[in-house]
Image (tube, grey):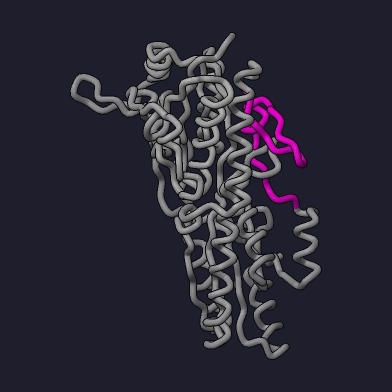
């Protein structure tokens, strides 16, 4: 089937590099294949409500270095569970057919979904209903299976590493324990990479439940070595041994309703309670999602965008573009979302961290 018009949307949380994908998709589609490109506004919400803009070359000029997404995004609007006003009452209904009819009425031959685990789960459902879909892996958490790296991850790690550089100076000046809480959901990739880069003394990740006694043991060990400060990086999904993750709030209408946050404060309180060592917490939060993408993410996002358009031309629907080694290939979307990619306990990165004296609190 000749593809004449494609749609594109950005779903889930924003991250650096989204605009690079949009730019690459638009330029590749127009320059190489003479296609039209439609961008749906605010993710899947725009698909359901038929809110869109036509993407052209002038419209994507100069956006490669910008963070965020010119199309807007949301992580709360699932077409298969969409908040709808029905007979004067709000209720959640399946509006996927409405979204598909919008694609048909616009003459769109297929849809490129740029998103993480939640958005690609939705993309898979549309694929099951016969929509020609190609996914692009996006998440700062780097937790998507079937791809070596997701774009946005390296920029988030860079932001966290810069924060650790700054925390080092104030920690050393005041002889404190400084804790940096980073994102990552149920995987510890950001914490592990940032901790290694930023010279952390302790890294706490969801994959390795911690013992508070082991953390304090590390802090005291450093004091005995005349190092009167310690740096701890805590992934938001970290948890104590025989304990649970700290949940900040629940968002029922979201694909993943759990919002983690607060583990950094818990660790700080436990350290001060047991050891009486002054401890401070910095929660990096959405700073990790913002700002200009680093060159690696701009290049990776561009490669993904070009590959997504080519996948359509080659008829490889129901797939996600994926980095495998140095090559970008396509894999079934279901392979990318069937399970989260977590840090392996015997990985070279974990072993390297232990070798240079970093504690995981175990």
Q: Is residue 257 above or below residue 226?
A: above
Q: Which residues are magenta?
A: 318-344
Q: Residue at x 67, y 38 (%)?
A: 145
Compare residues 88 and 18 and report the one nearer the observer: 18
- Left or right placement of residue 29 versus residue 354 in this view: left
Residue at image point 62% right, 46% down: 142
Q: Residue at x 67, y 73 (%)?
A: 201
Above or below, 82 relative to 256: above
Residue 326 in the magenta stretch? The answer is yes
Q: Quadrant of the N terminus?
A: top right
User: Is residue 244 something one can see in this rendering?
Assistant: no
Residue 191 at what x, y percent from top left?
Answer: 62, 59
> In the rendered image, which quarter is residue 161 located in?
bottom right
**Quarter occupied by the C terminus:** bottom right
Spot occupied by residue 291 in the image (x, y as percentages of width and height): 47, 55
Is residue 143 covered in magenta? no
Q: Nearer the viewer, residue 354 or 109?
A: 109
- What residue appears at the point 67 percent right and 34 percent down from the top-left corner? 322
What is the x, y in percent for residue 162? 56, 67
Locate residue 62: give its quadrant: top left
């Amino acid at each position: 089937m000749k593809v004449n018009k494609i749609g594109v949307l950005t779903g889930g949380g924003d991250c650096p590099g989204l605009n690079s994908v949009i730019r690459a998709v638009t330029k590749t589609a127009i320059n190489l294949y003479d296609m039209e490109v439609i961008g749906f506004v605010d993710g899947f919400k725009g698909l359901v409500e038929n809110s869109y803009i036509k993407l052209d070359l002038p419209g994507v000029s100069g956006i490669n270095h910008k963070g965020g997404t010119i199309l807007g995004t949301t992580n709360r609007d699932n077409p298969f569970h969409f908040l709808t006003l029905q007979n004067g009452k709000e209720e959640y209904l399946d509006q996927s057919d409405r979204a598909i009819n919008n694609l048909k009425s616009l003459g769109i031959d297929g849809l490129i979904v740029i998103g993480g685990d939640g958005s690609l789960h939705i993309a898979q459902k549309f694929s099951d209903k016969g929509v020609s879909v190609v996914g692009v892996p996006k998440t700062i958490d780097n937790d998507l299976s079937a791809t070596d790296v997701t774009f946005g991850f390296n920029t988030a790690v860079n932001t966290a590493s810069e924060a650790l550089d700054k925390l080092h100076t104030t920690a050393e000046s005041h002889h404190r324990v400084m804790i940096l809480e980073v994102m990552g959901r149920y995987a510890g990739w950001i914490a592990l990479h940032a901790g290694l880069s930023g010279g952390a003394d302790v890294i706490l990740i969801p994959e390795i439940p911690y013992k508070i006694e082991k953390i304090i043991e590390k802090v005291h060990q450093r004091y005995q070595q005349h190092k009167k400060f310690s740096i701890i990086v805590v992934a938001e999904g970290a948890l104590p041994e025989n304990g649970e993750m700290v949940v900040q709030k629940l968002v029922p209408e979201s694909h993943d309703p759990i919002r983690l946050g607060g583990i950094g404060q818990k660790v700080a309180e436990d350290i001060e309670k047991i050891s009486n060592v002054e401890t401070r917490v910095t929660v990096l939060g959405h700073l990790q999602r913002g700002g200009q993408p680093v060159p690696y993410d701009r290049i990776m996002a561009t490669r993904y965008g070009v590959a997504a358009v080519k996948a359509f031309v080659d008829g490889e629907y129901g797939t996600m573009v994926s980095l495998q080694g140095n090559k970008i290939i396509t894999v079934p979307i279901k392979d990318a979302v069937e399970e989260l990619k977590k840090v392996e306990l015997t990985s070279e990165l974990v072993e390297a961290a232990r070798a240079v004296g970093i504690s995981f609190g175990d």
